Structure formats: C-alpha cells, structure tokens
Amino acid sequence: MTGTTRSSGGLDDRRKRLLFHCWHRGTREMDLILGRFADAEIGNLSDDELTQLEALLEVNDPDLYAAIAGDKVLPAGVTGALFARIKAYPIADDGV
C-alpha cells in the first residue's frame, strides 16, 4: 500500500488536514500506522479525539514509533484512549 485509500470528499477541513498529515509524516512506518488508522477512523472521530490526534502529530516520528512499539513512554498529555486505539490498530494488509 502506498497511500490513502480514502477520499477526503465529505470531510470538513480539519479532518482533511489531519488525514493528509497522517499520510505525510516523514517516515514510511508512521505513514502506514497513522495513515491506515486515519483512513478507517477519521470520519468518526469526535472533536476531542481530533484534538488528541493533533497532539500526537506534534510528536516526532522516532519517539512516536518507539511509543507505539512499547519502547518509550510519551507524556501523559499526549497518550490516552485514542493513542491506545492507534497502538492496537492492525497495520498489515488483509491480503498479506
């Protein structure tokens, strides 16, 4: 998979921006983790969850990847229920 499979059509500007940023992180690993999660969930996230996602996007890729892999602990203000959902989200293609 090389990028988003979800159209940004029908999304408000905030969600469009977040979807783009989830797929354009700087490292391919984080593109795949956050991008696939955003493809599936961006339309259903609450305003609070969008704020949490925005905070996660402020974390640099190596630290965020290490936290998702369980090798690093992020500050409490960044982690929460949304981070746990992202961490648990399957990143492999169904056909792999």
Image (tube, rainbow, N blue to C red):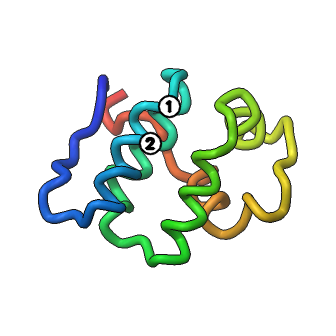
Please identify the quarter of the rendering in which residue 23 is found.
top left
Residue lying furthest front in this view? 13
Q: State whether residue 46 is above or below residue 72.
A: below
Give the percent coordinates (x, y) of residue 38.
40, 52
Label 1: state its secondary structure: loop
Q: Residue at x 71, y 67 (%)?
A: 80
Residue nearest the observer in this picture, 71 or 59: 59
Residue 82 pos. (x, y %): 60, 64
Residue assigned mark 2: 22
Query: Mark 2–mark 1 contact, CB under 8 Å?
Result: yes
Residue type for callout 2:
Cys
Name the kind of residue labelled 1 in the image. Answer: Arg
Q: Which mark is residue 25?
A: 1
Q: Residue at x 86, y 47 (%)?
A: 73
In this view, the residue in front, 46 or 32, is 46
Find residue 39 and name its label.
none
Q: Is residue 73 left or right of residue 87?
A: right
Nearer to us in this view, 15 or 67: 15
Give the percent coordinates (x, y) of residue 69: 73, 37
Q: Quadrant of the N terminus?
A: top left
